[in-house]
Amino acid sequence: MIPPTPGIAELSAHAGQEVRVRGWVTHLRSSGKVAFIVIRDGSGKLQCVLVKGSLAPETWERFAELTQETTIEVRGSVRPDARAPGGYELAVSDLTILGPSPTDYPIQPKEHGIDFLLDNRHLWLRSERQRAIARVRHEIEQGIRDFFYDRGFLLVDTPILTAAIGERSGLFATEYFEEGTAYLAQTGQLYGEAAAAAFGKIYCFGPTFRAEKSKTRRHLTEFWMCEPEVAFNDSEDNMHLQEELISYLVARCIERTRPELNELERDISRLETVATPFPRIDYSDAVTTLQAQGSSIKWGDDMGAEDETLLVEGHDRPLFIYNYPKEAKAFYMKENPADPRTVLCDDCLAPEGYGEIIGGSQREDDYERLLSRIQEENLPVDAYGWYLDLRKYGTFVHSGFGLGLERTVAWICGIPHLREAIAFPRTMNRLRP
Ligand code: 4AD
Ligand code: MG
């Protein structure tokens, strides 16, 4: 009988049995009579033990051909071992080399510079740390989908090629046949609004693009955004949905990715305090506070990264800054009836200096006001005819927000830079690999 090929994470179900395990060599050690191979298969790590005296000579000799990253198949019996990473090791009876790896593997167990690691991102992904981050990201993405699915939201996939500009930040443009210029979507929101009038509660979740000429640790040119849009939600309801989502995602990661957070040396106690309600600070109050702390911010300015860091200091959970000045924000936000200098919107700032993870707002639902905002911003009105129609045919109070996936991953993982929060980051100076 040919033994089964379980993943390393499944070995506990095969204790005492003969199996075959396939993976990549990460560590090698030999005393001359006993040799150890640690292999990785993506689901876990396994120590394989070879005893010279109990192996065919050619099998024992094959050990000498192994190098880091050689792809191998080992056959042997699964043995409980309290000191082993997954609680089991493999007593090897046979060893096959499936794919050799030359000794010049670029990533060695020593310090490498960040540019070198990013140039070798396709290989760097194999490290324990990158696996831990990828696993947390995966949990957050699944958490987002479950959160909205369980609450009856419909997933709507919005286009990436678009003629309607959504945000003020930089645009990637390309010629689009006879139709003029197409832009890579900065947001799916405008389409989400149309879908909300059709389906009520929706969300879109996909890659978005900003030709940002900023080299900060918080900016990518391609990032993933989750954008719910809800008919009849006002700005208050909108903030409530945001705090529910964030606390759900944090609790889920603590529960399901504790080993990965430990691998990343994340201080989990800083996440355990994340619970609703999050504090809410009016923009104007925030400016007064910041000025008292020595910031040069003036009423009307958007917040800089330093301002955001000052505001979250001493907070053990995210907080909302709400109702920013109109000129600091996008054209589609609803004018605040109580103070028309401002709009009904919020930024949700993560603690520990991770900055804005969500931008959200109630949308302008008045046809004339929206039209004048489009004109004031010098946007091409003809590209927004369909968007204005939403205010013409049955306008409705509605709100939504965009949660930046990489910023959320970076915060929950406790990693300083967004470039590790996505498998193949795109920044101003990085298009490869
Ligand atoms: O605040 P932003 O620009 O909002 C929107 O795009 C709205 N249309 C969302 C909506 O209401 N449906 O972006 C939302 C979030 C930010 O809070 C941030 O987390 C993330 O997207 N983000 C970026 N993440 C990485 N790199 C960038 N260049 C980002 N720009 C925004
Ligand atoms: Mg924003």
Image: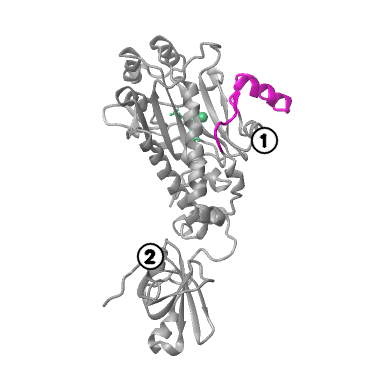
- Residue at image coords 48%, 58%: 124
Percent across and percent down for residue 339 are 56, 12
Residue type indicated by callout 2:
Gly
Which residue is most to the top? 368
Q: Is residue 220 left or right of residue 179?
A: right
Q: CA distance from mark 1 to mark 2?
A: 44 Å
Residue 13 found in image quarter: bottom left
Percent across and percent down for residue 256 are 47, 51
Task: Please tell me which residue lies in front, 204 or 425.
Answer: 204
Q: Residues within 10 Å of mark 1 (few under 14, many from 20)?
A: few
Question: Which span of residues is magenta-colored?
Answer: 275-303
Q: Is residue 111 left or right of residue 427?
A: right
**Mark identifier at residue 313:** 1
**Mark identifier at residue 7:** 2
- Residue at image coords 48%, 45%: 252
Task: Please tell me which residue lies in front, 188 or 156.
Answer: 156
